[in-house]
Image (tube, grey):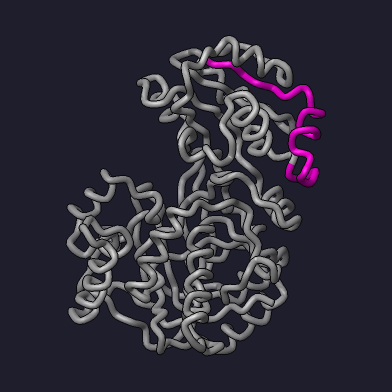
Amino acid sequence: MADIRPFRGWRYSPLKVTDLSKVITQPYDKISKELQQTYIARHPNSFVHLILPAAPDPYTYSTTTSKLWSSQLVLVRDPQPAIYVLHQEFQLGGQTRTRKSFVAAIRVDEFEKGTVLPHERTLSKPKADRLSLLRATRKDYEQIFMLYDDPTGLVDRALTPTGEPLMKATDDYGVVQKVWAITDPAKLASVRKALADKVMLIADGHHRYETALNFRQEMEREGSVPDDAALRFKSTAFVNISDPGLVILPTHRYLYGLTSPKWNDLVAQIGKWFETRSAKDAEVEPELAKAGTEHVFALHVGKNRNWILRLTDKSAVEQLVKDHSADYRDLDVAILHTLLIEHVFGVSPAQIEDHVAYERDLTETMNKVNSGRYQAALIMNPTRADQVQKVAAHGERMPQKSTDFYPKFVSGLVFMDIDDIERL
């Protein structure tokens, strides 16, 4: 049973920060060293100082900074519990779209309970980092992204905002964020009731959800934790899987650290399972776009050095991905990782962090290979939302970075206090 609750959010005071666009950031795991410095230079109260400080002891720095900004009333807390309605307006493919969501707290349960389902595997290093930050600050700074199934739009109607937004900001990619606070007890109760029987699917933020779970379990080992303790919950942005603004982009794979790869020989090996043909750079995107239900990839190893790979031997997938469901075997990302990354390029799942990197933008992907920064790239189509839902329902996990939901939920709009005395 999904336990969704409003919370008293912390946010920037409009009297102290007049332009919210200057202080919000991308999620911590999307912030490069260069972007971190850009944020620091942009505004002295940038949210980057809380989620990813450039300090020798980032966890203590974040804790001290949060307390300082609270005392200076740079950060203020809303007087009433609220569900925060968030609309994100963005351009994609020459069209203006709006993704509707709401921010609330969800009770953190073990995956075995079936209330919250993951769809990706996680890595240990990011979880250790976020757990250290959570221990030090007792602040839940960033939302994760969850999908729920509400084909009739009942929740959307209950949370239809009125009047001017409470907050408005534009992020680094031109995405406009508009936020309204819903505090009407009747509306809050109706949303909680409507969502109580839903199964939630983590779209993005697996590391942060598991970090919240690890922290809750750690606190339980230390002593009694009240049932309504805020640390039992995780602030989350929820999106209806039927929302027309829901977009998933592909995440391409870089290969590096391979021992003297001979591309022609490797392509010949790929030819056991795929139809292969050479292609110019300009042909890659159109070829993938017309794939339909076929499984089509591209291997890029240099300027105008590409091979289009079209799967012809589906029995290979049956043999090599035999411990998974048919829905899992139908995923491009599963085929790419199992047949290509593991069996052709020889990178086992345990070696992924040492040989595979990720990129969303196709032009950037090709440029970084052309410059020699990476040895090659595997270019792919995006996973569909319904595929994510089906695989998660089987209790299966996709390879890391199987989905790239766009746009990201920015950090710095609102966050939650999970100190020991906090209750929801």
Residue 95 vs residue 225, the one in the foreground: 225
Q: Is residue 103 above or below residue 321?
A: below
Q: Quadrant of residue 342?
A: top right
Does 361 sit above or below residue 175?
Answer: above
Q: Is residue 384 above or below residue 164?
A: above
Between 385 and 261, the one nearer to me in the picture? 261
Residue 370's x, y, as percent? 40, 19
> Closer to the camera, 197 or 220?
220
Determine the residue positioned at 38% across, 47% down.
173
Is 253 positioned to the left or the right of 319 in the image?
Answer: left
- The residue at the point 23 percent across, 55 percent down is 54
Residue located 55% across and 38% down the image? 250
Residue 83 drawn in magenta: no
**In front: 159, or 79?**
79
* Quarter of the figure with residue 313: top right
Q: Does the magenta run of residues contain 326?
A: yes
User: Residue 387: x and y, percent?
Assistant: 70, 48
Q: Is residue 359 visible?
A: no
Question: Going 55% across and 72% down the picture, which residue do you hit?
Answer: 160
Question: Left or right: where does residue 38 sit relative to residue 278?
Answer: left
| Horizontal and vertical percent position of residue 345 | 58, 25
**What is the x, y in percent for residue 292?**
71, 32
- Observer able to see residue 219: yes
Q: How many badges with numbers are in the image? A: 0
Name the quadrant of the N terminus.
Answer: bottom right
Residue extent of the magenta highlight: 306-328
